[in-house]
Image: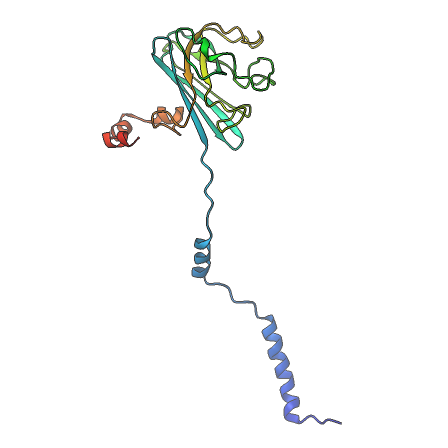
Amino acid sequence: MTRVSPLHAAALPLALVALAAFACTPPAEEAPEEVAAIEEEMPIEPEPAPSTATATLTTADGTEVGTATFTQENGQTTASFHLTSVAAPGTHGIHVHENGECTPPDFTSAGGHFNPAGVDHACPPTTPRHAGDFGNLEIAEDGSGHLDITTDLITVEDGPNSVVGKAVILHGGQDDCTTQPTGDAGARLACGVIESGGADGMNGMDHDDMEGMDDDGMEGMDDDGMDDE
């Protein structure tokens, strides 16, 4: 029979208490500096920039009357039509046409409406409709007008629904949204070929940004800044 000395017997409970205390001790937390260093080492993936395309609309005599901007982001494309000096106020049909050609005087070189799905003509928000159907735009007495439409029927990036290389047509009359295949929108007043990227260095600056830029903001843009663009 093994005999335990009184000294060993007294030490045993102390050892058990120490072991239990060690087991319950939480792990040491990392210092804030160490956490910050780890976060700095982790690469941050930048969000992809939206894809853009633009067109400058001109009349048969070469007068610029407005622009169209297409911005693709998160599976949707926003078409922004900004007209500044259209001679005929009223309601005008506006469409994307299938050919990127704007040969005056009648712009028939732009072909028919852009319609990769081969469906009937209609006006937003009706579906199905041509990918190039954007309905009507109101032109004020001063020749100005603006229209924004967001859709998944077109893209800027490469693909069968890309508007790059197509043409924007402003018509002389109102799109009735029913007559096939054109909406009976009348003659073609202005035309612009859609090209990838921003127009005149204004890529990413929308209609509201332009209106918010005052004379001081324009004076702050020097010749060097313009040359860099």
Q: Tell me the residue at 43%/15% (across/down).
A: 101
Instruction: Tell me if 113 is positioned left or right of 127 in this view.
Output: left
Instruction: Tell me if 178 is positioned left or right of 53 in this view.
Output: right
Q: How many marks?
A: 0
- Residue at the extreme left: 223
Using the image as rendered, state which of residue 24 and residue 149 is in the foreground. 149
Question: Where does residue 66 sit, x and y in percent of width and height?
Answer: 38, 16
Quadrant of image for the C terminus: top left
Question: Where does residue 163 sit, x and y in percent of width and height?
Answer: 48, 22
Quadrant of image for the N terminus: bottom right
Rendered image quadrant of residue 69:
top left
Is residue 72 in view from this perspective? Answer: yes
Question: Where does residue 106 sit, x and y in percent of width and height?
Answer: 42, 6
Using the image as rendered, state which of residue 117 and residue 210 is in the foreground. 117
Q: Tell me the residue at 55%/23% (across/down).
A: 153
Q: Tell me the residue at 34%/8% (across/down).
A: 61
Instruction: Tell me if 6 is positioned left or right of 180 in this view.
Output: right
Instruction: Tell me if 50 is positioned left or right of 115 in this view.
Output: left
Check the image and report above or below for 124 versus 188: below
Rendered image quadrant of residue 15:
bottom right
Question: Where does residue 209 sit, x and y in percent of width and height?
Answer: 37, 27
Rendered image quadrant of residue 215:
top left
